[in-house]
Image (spheres, grey):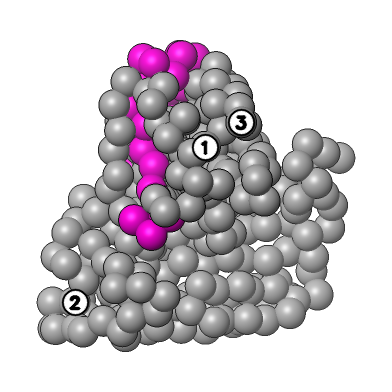
Amino acid sequence: MSAYAAEEDFALAASLVREAGALALAMRREGLTGKQKTSVSDVVTAADHAAEELVLETLRRLRPEDGILGEEGASHEGTSGRTWVIDPVDGTYNFLSGSTYWCSALALRDDREADTVSGNPPVLLGAIFQPQEDRLWLGGPGHPATLNGEELPALKDADLDRLSAGTYLHPTWLKREDVAGPWTRAASGAATLRMLGSGSCDLGSVATGRLGLWFQHSCPEWDWLPGKAIVEAASGTTAVIEVRGFRWYIAGPAAAVREVQRRLADS
């Protein structure tokens, strides 16, 4: 039986990503420095932690039975069988550099049953807010994909060679044939490429048609689930496949997603 999030959950998610994004932006205006995590382009700031703490505290108060998983370490074991997945600032390198291409994102995952296709828990809702562009995406099963409250038209099917592809590959992975090889085969089939630095912003753009398709390897849940829910709510297709020991995440029109899967797996 399919599970759905309540309208109150969507309203809460929308409020939380707006508040988290507004807090992060206000802190950036006051001045921030970044701390390197895994590389010079993988950074975290005090705004990431503060925005995540804001979401955590609100969820613990309003949804005490739900679990919580945050990129910056927030964790709460719930009893409801549902888990909120938090990305307080997605695209922190962009954020710290003064770009507008970053967002706050949130998903609600249903841990009570596995998705019949992927075997993973289904996602009940996604919320993405790009503060400086004032763009709020929402979507999930039983809830249409919307941008600032306006329902998005259903994505039209299209072949990969007619579409722009949003993607990301850190330069260090170019030295790894087991990753660079599949990525190059998939990327070379697109009409053009866009590497913009925020997976959730990219996936929101796929839902609106500003980007044709998106693919990336090794995505944590907070980079995938919010946008996955919204793309699917816009009648798009998502897929996860394993190639040479790495998981690849793909979203867009059905024909293009199938072509990326074929190219990634074609060894």
Which percent across, then down, holds residue 82? Answer: 73, 64
Q: Quadrant of the N terminus?
A: top right
| Residue denoted by label 1 | 182
Magenta stretch: give its range.
148-173
SS assignment at label 2 = helix
Residue sitting at x 68%, y 66%: 83
- Give the vertical position of 163 relative to 233 (above or below): above
Look at the image and say whether residue 162 sits in the magenta stretch.
yes
- The Cα–Cα distance between marks 1 and 3, rounded to whole angstroms, is 8 Å
Which percent across, then down, holds residue 256? Answer: 50, 21
| Residue denoted by label 3 | 267
Instruction: Say whether residue 77 is left or right of residue 222.
Output: right
- The Cα–Cα distance between marks 2 and 1, rounded to whole angstroms, is 37 Å
Q: Earlier in the sequence, mark 1 or mark 3?
A: 1
Check disc 2 and give the amino acid type: Arg
Q: Earlier in the sequence, mark 2 or mark 1?
A: 2
Residue sitting at x 49%, y 39%: 181
User: On the image, which quarter does residue 97 sit in?
Assistant: bottom left
Callout 2 touching callout 3 (CB < 8 Å): no
- Give the vertical position of 77 relative to 260 (above or below): below
Other-residue count near label 1 (Cα within 10 Å), few / some / many at <14 / 14–19 / ≥20: many
Q: Nearer the viewer, mark 1 or mark 3?
A: 3
Check disc 3 and give the amino acid type: Ser
Q: Looking at the picture, tell me which residue is in the foreground, 27 or 202.
A: 202
| Residue denoted by label 2 | 28
Q: Is residue 144 visible?
A: no
